[in-house]
Amino acid sequence: METKNYSEEIDVQKYLLVLKRRWWIASGVFAACTSLAGLILFTQKPAYEASGQLLFQLNRTSSLTGVGEKIGDLESVKRESNPLDTQALVLQSLPVKQQVIDTLKLKDKKGAPLNPELLGIKAASVLGTDALKVDYTSEDPQLATAVVNEVMKSFIANNILYNKTEAISAGTFIEQELPRAKKQLEQAAEALRNFKVQNQIIELKEETTKSVENISEVEKELANARAQLADVTAQEVAIRRQMNLPVNRAVNVTSLSQTAGVQELLGELQKVQSQLASQGARYTPAHPAIVTLKNQEAALNSLLQQRISQSLGYSAAISPSQLQMGKIKQDLTSDFVRLQSQSLGLEKKVQALSQVIESYKRRANIVPNLEKRQGELERNLSVAQKSYENLITRLQEIKVAENQTVGNARVIQSAVVGSSPGEIKKKLAISLGSVFAGVLLGVAAAFFVDLIDRRLKTTKEAEALFGYTLLGLIPKFETNNTSTQLETSLQGVSPRVIVATTPRTVIHEAYQMLQANLKFISLDKKVRTIVVSSSISGEGKSEVAANLAAVMALAGRRVLLVDADMRLPSQHHLWGLINSVGLSNVMVGENDFSKTVQNITSKLSILTAGVMPPNPQALIDSERMTSFIDMLAQTYDYVIFDTPPLIGTADAAVLGNMVDGVLIVVRPGLVDSTTATAAKSLLARSEANILGIVANAVDVKHEPDNYFYYNNSRSEQNAEKVNTALLP
């Protein structure tokens, strides 16, 4: 997030810097816009506005089309609208305008009757009132007054006629609507009656309340019956467990126990069985007495089963031992039968009560739909009845309105003339618009000019285009003849050699920083011989080379400054020397180096260009130059070559391939991107060691804040005049 904010801040500074550079263009466009607006305002003629007011009756009802109290309301027959807006539209209609033109005999500039569409009448409601304001603007105040008064007069006359016509039309319309409204009323009443008959409805609300009460009572009774059924069922289970007999068998045994014929045979059978038991103890089974008793027992058993079948009505195999039941079991059997009967009755009752509840609930479920449908039918009936009654009332009032000559508007203020507020607003709009347009167009023009200007405007752009390290930045400065030389031998040195003539300045510090940066990049490999060049002439390469040599010498290094620009030499001018002999003479063997070099200080020596040769590149691109550079590197700590610009000559590129490194001087605002790109391409093909770039003559006010090491308020103020920039 912090990186993003920083980028946005830099972009804003970039736009502000564009405005700083092109302020004169923006100012010129702004001045042109404001001057044009002033001329327009000066040539405009004064305008006058006349205003009048009409008061309207704004009842919400109408004697013509609504259930009203007064005549002449503004409400439409078929729909509700804004009355004042409607009347404002009528007042500005072409018929009203044409009447005004005919009455006042208004003409256009050619003398022909004025076109109604050109009559600019304005009408608008007064906020919070029932009044309508009528305005007309003209250069003639009397004409403006006459037009407004005539407009209001014509409108009132037309309004009275319109009201009467409207009453007649409304009466005809309502007479046609009455039969239809009556028929709708009858249909709505019949639909409601049929609905109540079909659904057996008397009063749905009472029916709903009564149904809820009935359901509650039946549910209570159902709950009581279910409780009784549960109790009877529990008793029935308990008795069945005590009887230890199936239900049907227990009932049969109880019935047979109370049958006399069965019990008599059972008694005889028991007597025979007793004798058989007694005789069996005395005799063997084959004894005649035993056999006789067994035959009797079998006969009695057979007869007993017949009696049982006769008593029950069907054949049932019941053991004689089960035909005798005690009083308790007989009572239990009777209770069990009774409980079974009660249980069956309670089950029927629960089933019947559940069905009753279901019927109530089914009726309750359809009641909401019935209520909804009944409500719709009742509303339809109410609407139809109100519509019919409303039409009857309107028809009665229309009959009265047809004979009335009352309008719904009257003049409460005749036309009053004054200065046109619209004209004042127009002038204010022109003034503010010119300022806004001037600012907008000025900024746009500044950015457009800056966009089509292909020059490198800032050091940042130069660094981005070349892609080399920025080693130094020399602020733009002015010089005068007042200087403080380090040594008396420097008399005659140009004030542009700031390091030698005006020490301890901001410019001096900049060159010291350049020297330090060169030292930092040469830690791995010592850089002793340096070529200083630029893309084109005028970028200050010779000045940078001279000051760099001087600042190195001040640091105690032995420095030789060689003017290798044999086409247009300049070092002898900067140092106040005579260029009678120099580098060209040494290269052709006319003079020895020791006799040609000129010592400025004990640490700084200058080798001027010498006599201009016919082919300087041939001297540079030679074995002698290579040997000469090797010899200089053995003698001096630093050797700086001031070479011609890269564009147009190959001297700098050739020489740059022979030395330890090349230093490119760039002057923002002078070199364009095309030239700089060509210079960069030439350096790339030469395969020279590019140390970096030096931005020269930089206007620090046009650079982004906090981008360079020296960019502060002191350097901005002190870089303009170096003779006043002495450090404390």
Image (cartoon, grey):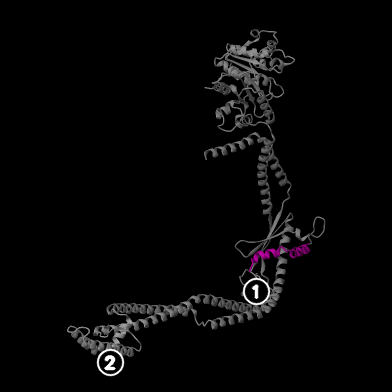
Taking the magenta stretch, the answer to whether it contains residue 92 is yes
Measured as percent of width and height from the top left, residue 696 is found at: 62, 25
- 138 or 250: nearer the eye? 250
User: Does the image show residue 483?
Assistant: no
Q: Which region shows up in magenta? A: 80-104
Amino acid at dot 1: Thr
Q: Earlier in the sequence, mark 1 or mark 2?
A: 1
**Which one is closest to the eye, mark 1 or mark 2?**
2
Taking the magenta stretch, the answer to whether it contains residue 682 is no
Q: Is residue 628 above or below residue 121?
A: above
Residue for point 56% across, 29% down: 708
- 221 or 492: nearer the eye? 221
Amino acid at dot 2: Gly
State the mark number for residue 261. 2
State the SS at label 1: loop
State the mark number for residue 556. none
- 124 or 176: nearer the eye? 176
Q: Is residue 164 above or below residue 582?
A: below
State the SS at label 2: helix
